[in-house]
Amino acid sequence: MIKTFMRRPILRGLAIASLGVGVIGCYAFAQQGGFDPERMKREALAQPFIGVTTDGTPQPGLYDIESTGVPAAEVVAAAHNFFASMPE
C-alpha cells in the first residue's frame, strides 16, 4: 500500500501539502497564544475540583471512598515492576 501511495505523485503531493498546512496552522495558533500548556495547567489547577460530571453539577454519593483491603505499597511495587519489564 505504501509503495502504491509513493508511486502516485498526486496523492503524495496532497499528503505533503496537508501536512504543511497542518504544521503552519499549529504554529500560527501557538504564536497567537492559543496553545500554552503551562497557562492551561495553571488555569485548571486554580479551579476547585468538583468531581467528574456530565453537566458541571456533581452527583453526590456515586462512589463511597472505602478501603479495599489491598495494600497500596504492593500495588505501587507491582506497577514499578511492570514498567521495569517493558522494553525501552
Image (cartoon, rainbow, N blue to C red):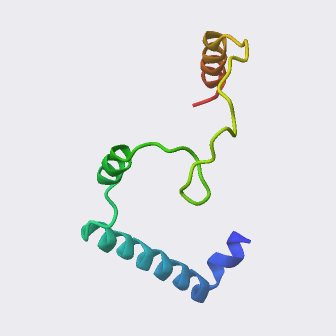
The residue at 29%/53% (across/down) is 39
Q: Quadrant of residue 24?
A: bottom left
Q: As drawn, which residue projects farthest toward the bottom?
A: 10
- Lateral position of residue 27 relative to residue 14, left or right: left
Between residues 31 and 9, which one lies in front from this camera angle?
A: 31
Residue 29, position as x, y percentages in the image:
33, 71
Measuring from the top left, give residue 22's x and y in whole percent.
44, 75
- The image quadrant where one finds the C terminus is top right
Q: Is residue 22 above or below residue 84?
A: below
The N terminus - image quarter: bottom right
Q: Classify 34 as above or below 50.
A: below
43 relative to 74 in the view: left or right = left
71 sits to left or right of 41: right
Residue at 58% in and 86% down: 9
Residue 47 drawn at (x, y percent): 37, 47
x and y percentages locating residue 55 in the rendered image? 58, 60
Q: Is residue 38 above or below residue 23?
A: above
